[in-house]
Image: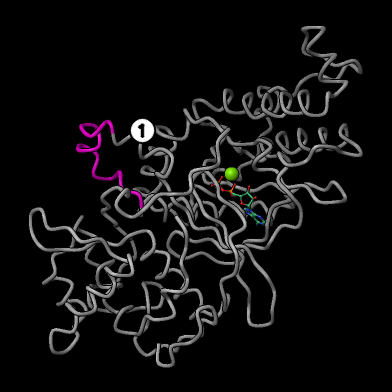
């Protein structure tokens, strides 16, 4: 899905007020009744109805009329609420070009007031898995917690917490800047995904440092679970940066060993195929666990013994218990069986989005507008792209 920032240009404060009202209503309604939206937004003279038509025209909300007249947010509407909040907070001032399409995310450049360029990751959980899950409607019907905006928010929260903790512990990850709803702001990594690199000066060194990272992560109590050439960035000096953390698990996860081995295997396979790596080849030819220098393939059991407790620190941070359970379920049911080879689904329109039941956990009472939960009605709009609407 493209993020058409142009639509933001034409949105006034009433639009954001009503959009926020829809979001609030989605805490306990899949489709929020129009009357409820009107009650929360409290616009004069039936203004809510006019605004809703405008939001619908801009694809920021989806109209549902099966059981009653109502609306829900689309991903685009959710994007705008997050962007608006972060811009109001002064985190960035403009949105630039799209730099990445992940399996379940869109990545854009954003710029701060002083011109620093950062990366904005908008989580889109369910983009690749939705079509598969859609055919299992029965299964979905019994799973109210299976809603994509909510899960995308959890994924962002988790990614932000992990990125921050890993950075604090000296791991080569982007700097975590801020997070709101399903949106994570981080430093822009200079370099390219390893998958795009055809030739390396020192493939052995890069290979060793990547394997070393997997081991060091496990020594801290964590497994990446999607450690592959798509999620490793490499710069001109062949320095690597790891990205993409929503699916990370603790070494005490019951499938930890399988995930660890799978991460290692992905790296061996890729380096063997792409760089024809000597040590990898020898290992495979010999059919043993040792390469020609007698180095053995990292073993989960030996790492796990002395593992630190970053996993426990992180489990305790940010997430409520219910959020953790929901996220773990998602990882288990959708991510565990994934294949990491296709990154190309970019054409979802709002009609293809699943019905969403968004349930944010913060404690604003309906009818109050906090910065965290959307636009402040008196807040000025400092968004440059699109330019300020003056009274935002
Ligand atoms: P997904 O979870 O959907 O796979 P990723 O976090 O892996 O999303 O990001 C998808 C792509 O976006 C990456 O392969 C990379 O090209 C680009 N990207 C992500 N984060 C950054 C960043 N901080 N700096 C530069 N490019 C990034
Ligand atoms: Mg990725």
Name which quarter of the figure residue 224 lies in. Answer: top right
Front residue of 179/33: it is 33
Residue placed under numbered mark 1 in the picture: 132
Q: Horizontal placement of 19 versus 91: left or right?
A: left
Q: Is 198 one of the magenta-colored residues?
A: no
Q: Quadrant of the C terminus?
A: bottom left
Residue 243 at x, y percent in the picture: 64, 48
Q: Is residue 390 above or below residue 183?
A: below
Q: Is residue 22 above or below residue 208?
A: below
Q: Is residue 67 above or below residue 90?
A: above
Q: Secondary structure at mark 1?
A: helix
Determine the residue positioned at 14% across, 69% down: 34
Q: Is 141 one of the magenta-colored residues?
A: yes
Name which quarter of the figure residue 140 lies in. Answer: top left
Q: How is the image coloured?
A: one colour
Residue 32 at x, y percent in the picture: 18, 63
Q: Horizontal placement of 202 versus 167: left or right?
A: right
Magenta-highlighted residues: 135-148
Q: Quadrant of the N terminus?
A: bottom left
Front residue of 220/234: it is 234
Q: Is residue 192 above or below residue 36?
A: above
Residue 283 at x, y percent in the picture: 81, 14
């Amino acid at each position: 899905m493209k993020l058409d920032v142009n639509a933001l240009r034409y949105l006034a404060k009433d639009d954001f007020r009503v959009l926020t009202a829809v979001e609030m209503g989605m805490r306990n309604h899949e489709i929020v009744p129009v009357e409820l939206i009107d009650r929360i937004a409290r616009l004069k003279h039936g203004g809510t109805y006019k605004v809703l038509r405008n939001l619908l025209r801009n694809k920021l909300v989806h109209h549902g009329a099966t059981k009653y007249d109502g609306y829900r947010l689309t991903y685009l509407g959710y994007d705008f609420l997050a962007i608006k909040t972060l811009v109001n907070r002064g985190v960035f001032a403009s949105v630039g070009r799209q730099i990445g399409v992940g399996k379940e995310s869109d990545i854009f450049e954003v710029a701060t007031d002083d011109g620093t360029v950062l990366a904005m990751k908008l989580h889109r959980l369910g983009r690749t898995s939705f079509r598969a899950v859609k055919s299992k409607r029965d299964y979905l019907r019994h799973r109210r917690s299976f809603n994509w905006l909510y899960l995308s928010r959890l994924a962002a929260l988790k990614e932000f917490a992990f990125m921050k903790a890993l950075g604090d512990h000296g791991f080569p990850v982007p700097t975590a800047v801020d997070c709101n709803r399903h949106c994570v702001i981080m430093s822009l990594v200079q370099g390219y995904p390893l998958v795009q690199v055809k030739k390396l000066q020192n493939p052995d060194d890069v290979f060793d440092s990547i394997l070393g990272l997997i081991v060091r992560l496990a020594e801290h109590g964590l497994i990446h679970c999607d450690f592959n050439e798509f999620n490793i960035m490499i710069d001109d000096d062949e320095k690597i940066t790891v990205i993409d953390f929503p699916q990370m698990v603790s070494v005490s996860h019951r499938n930890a060993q399988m995930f660890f081995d799978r991460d290692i295997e992905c790296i061996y396979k890729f380096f063997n195929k792409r760089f024809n790596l000597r040590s990898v080849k020898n290992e495979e030819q010999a059919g043993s666990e040792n390469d020609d220098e007698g180095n053995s393939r990292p073993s989960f059991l030996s790492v796990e013994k002395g593992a630190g407790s970053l996993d426990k620190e992180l489990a305790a941070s940010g997430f409520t218990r219910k959020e953790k359970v929901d996220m773990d379920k998602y990882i288990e049911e959708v991510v565990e069986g994934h294949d990491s080879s296709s990154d190309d689904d970019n054409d979802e329109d709002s009609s293809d989005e699943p019905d969403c039941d968004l349930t944010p956990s913060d404690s604003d009472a309906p009818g109050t507008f906090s910065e965290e939960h959307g636009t402040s009605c008196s807040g000025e709009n400092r968004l440059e792209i699109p330019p300020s609407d003056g009274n935002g």
